[in-house]
Image (tube, grey):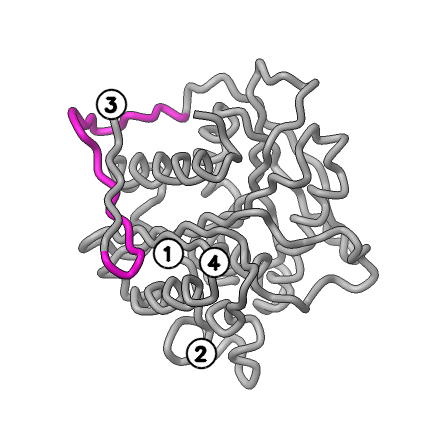
Amino acid sequence: MKWKTTVLAMGIVCVCLVGRVDAQTIDVDNLPVTERQEVYKTIGDVELKMHIFEANDRDTETAAPAVVFFFGGGWTGGSPKQFFPHCRYFASRGMVAMAAEYRIKSKHGTTPFECTADGKSAVRWIRANAKKLGIDPKQVVAGGGSAGGHVAACTGTIQRHDEEKEDTSVSSTPDAMMLFNPVIDTTSKGYGAAKVKGRETEISPAHHVRKGIPPTIIFHGTADTTVPYENVERFDKLMREAGNTCRLVPFDGKGHGFFNHGRDADSFDKTIRAADEFLTELGILTP
């Protein structure tokens, strides 16, 4: 099976399979991968866990690239389990793949600002524990979907909102980002303005684009009525105008959450393989 990537106008990318397409070509449930957990952050009596996936036969003598995913749920609900299938896949590709818990309104009474701080803490914890985790601190990827895509995007764009008393000499900025229908504009033009009222642009990634943002790939349905497709088109344009690498992969007619495992096998397969290709081009993954 081969993949064909076609670059369209405005830097938008069309990814399609050449040859036979099975209903589900990636069997993530049966990959030889092991999961474990560690607490990466404690705030008061709240312990936030990192779910860590590694291939059973991983060479622990070689520093591996890492990826951390943040779940969606409008900063209110959700579970790290959303990205366990992605973690299993990327662990099988030689990464140390992680799905992070972060504070959410339904459990902790928090706002998107605390979510952002937790995302930055997660990336910083991975780097600070690179030796113990057996990872390369210069190959850390942040990913996520919807509100979790926002958390991931904030780790790469927002320069403030680090947790107080953390060692900011350890960077919380990832080396690349993979975003699945992310909240990218928190003003009235996007999603979540009411949840950040009076501070609409403070953690709005689209309003903090500058030169030096990590290379980014974005998957988004053109029929998304939760997070407007226009938002990621605009972000993509701003990124490229600033001299950054950004690849927008549109999924024609797809709505919000189209990429999730168990919802649309073909879209899951295409997004995960295109993300793999992107990371391979960056030198994070090997062919």
Asked if the magenta segment contains residue 14, the reply would be: yes
Pointer 2 or 1: first along the chain: 1
Where is mark 1, residue-wise? 181
Pair 4/2: label in front:
4
Where is mark 3, residue-wise? 1
Q: Position of residue 161 (x, y in %)?
A: 68, 67
Pointer 3 or 1: first along the chain: 3
Q: Position of residue 235 (x, y in %)?
A: 40, 66
Where is mark 4, residue-wise? 244
Residue extending furthest toward the front: 243
Viewer-closest of 47 and 190? 190
Q: Secondary structure at mark 1?
A: loop
Pointer 1 or 4: first along the chain: 1
Where is mark 2, residue-wise? 187
Q: Quadrant of the N terminus?
A: top left
Pointer 3 or 2: first along the chain: 3
- Tag 4: amino acid: Asn
Q: Are marks 3 and 1 in contact (CB under 8 Å)?
A: no
Q: Which residues are magenta?
A: 9-28
